[in-house]
Image (cartoon, rainbow, N blue to C red):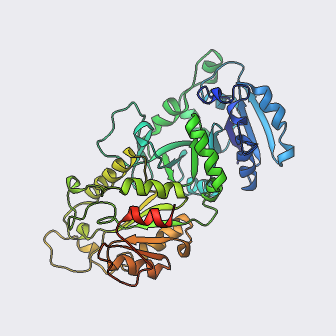
Amino acid sequence: MKVVLMAGGKGSRIAKLFPDIPKPLIPIQGTPVLEREIISLRDQGFTDIILTVGYMRQKIQEYFGNGEKWGVNIEYFVEEKPLGNAGALFFLDLKEDFLLLNADAVFDVDFNRMVAFHRQHGGLVTLFTHPNSHPYDSGIIIAQNAGKVEKWLTKEDRRPVFYKNRVNAGLHVISPKALKLSGIRLEEIKNGKMVDLDRQILKPLCSSGTMYCYDSPEYVKDMGTRERFHQVEEDFEKGIVQAKNLNNKQKAVFLDRDGTINKYVGFLRKVEEFELIEGVAEAVKEINRSGYLAVIVTNQPVIARGEITFSELENIHNKMETLLGMQGAYVDAIYFCPHHPHFGYDGEVKELKIECECRKPKPGMLLKAAKDLNIDLSSSYMVGDSENDIKAGKAAGSKSVLLNTKREFYGQDICVANLKEFVDQYLR
């Protein structure tokens, strides 16, 4: 599969730190960011690379040449005049699906996993999407559970009150058919038409059933500001960037929801009842910084009992993600069990009234997350406020953490008063 790396941007914000080199050549621990990306792609078997270049292109071409030094084949498309961030694609001989990556971002991603997802779903486009620490000023993707993209909201667009922290990261698998569907002709571009990838090619595919989002917790970060650049440097120094590639075993903090993330109110049935526990957002932010994944695993028998719907539960979880995001925190994944084994409730959903393998104290949700995200359960923690949380963690082979000011003992490995205390003592 060909890889097109867009490396023509000026990077005007970060240029103040590096005025004499293009953004893709900015060094991190002595190695240009684009070189790190090319090496990562090569190691995954992607060796046929096209660089689209413009600003300070000579420096990029001189540094990488034909790519032989790195064991890849590099071709160049030179933008003599600005074409927009997607105009160059119409000049390339792209006959099969290709990876389109933004070289301005720092990433370390298992692209074979993403390509497999793309082929399995058979869409024209797959977007790499992930949660980030500032969803309120990022483009948000709204999708069905199957991953089909329904809406694409820019930071300027009006968005729902509560939304899932699902951000487009600028990494794509694209079929050439998507370019043809845009209706844009090469002659128009040669005559000066600028082409915007998101607005003119991708966003029109929303609700068409042909564009999917690939959710992943892997490392992708724009280093366009001084603060973000220094954060990337720190993350490389700690080994977080490489470690979060899903080809590597992950560590996770599994988090119960009610009484751990939000204030316990019994069976939570209304979005208005959801309220974060004080200090939780800062604690989750520290989990994000630590390199551990933050994964919610929660029993929700209220669905089987007919007391809320799946969409109402989704709105509650969207509120959780929105409130966390406003404070710079995020969860990497949410797993919930909708089942309940006991009959006798008005409006109950009979097909969900079963003995399942996912309802805690059984470890099914943890095992599913471990399979999906390549998690090493023995290096992970299960954090919750009940005996069932402890039993689920133990059954999965994870370390168990009880949040309980009374210090009750259910066989847990660790007992602390709240999530913040756990993070402060064990993850910092």
Which image quadrant for residue 137?
top left
Residue 261 coordinates in the image, percent (x, y): 33, 61
Which image quadrant for residue 221?
top right
Specify the farthest residue to the top: 191
**For residue 387, side relative to residue 81 (left or right):** left
Q: Is residue 204 visible?
A: yes
* Residue located 48% across and 67% down the image: 369
Q: Nearer the viewer, residue 15 or 97?
A: 15
* Residue located 45% across and 38% down the image: 138
Specify the farthest residue to the left: 346
Q: Is residue 216 visible?
A: no
Residue 274 coordinates in the image, percent (x, y): 25, 56
* Residue located 53% across and 74% down the image: 377
Q: Nearer the viewer, residue 420 or 4?
A: 420
Residue 59 coordinates in the image, percent (x, y): 79, 29
Depicted 243 relative to depicted 107: above or below = below
Residue 26 coordinates in the image, percent (x, y): 70, 36
Q: Nearer the viewer, residue 354 or 265?
A: 265
Specify the farthest residue to the right: 69
Depicted 102 relative to depicted 407: above or below = above
**For residue 366, side relative to residue 218 (left or right):** left
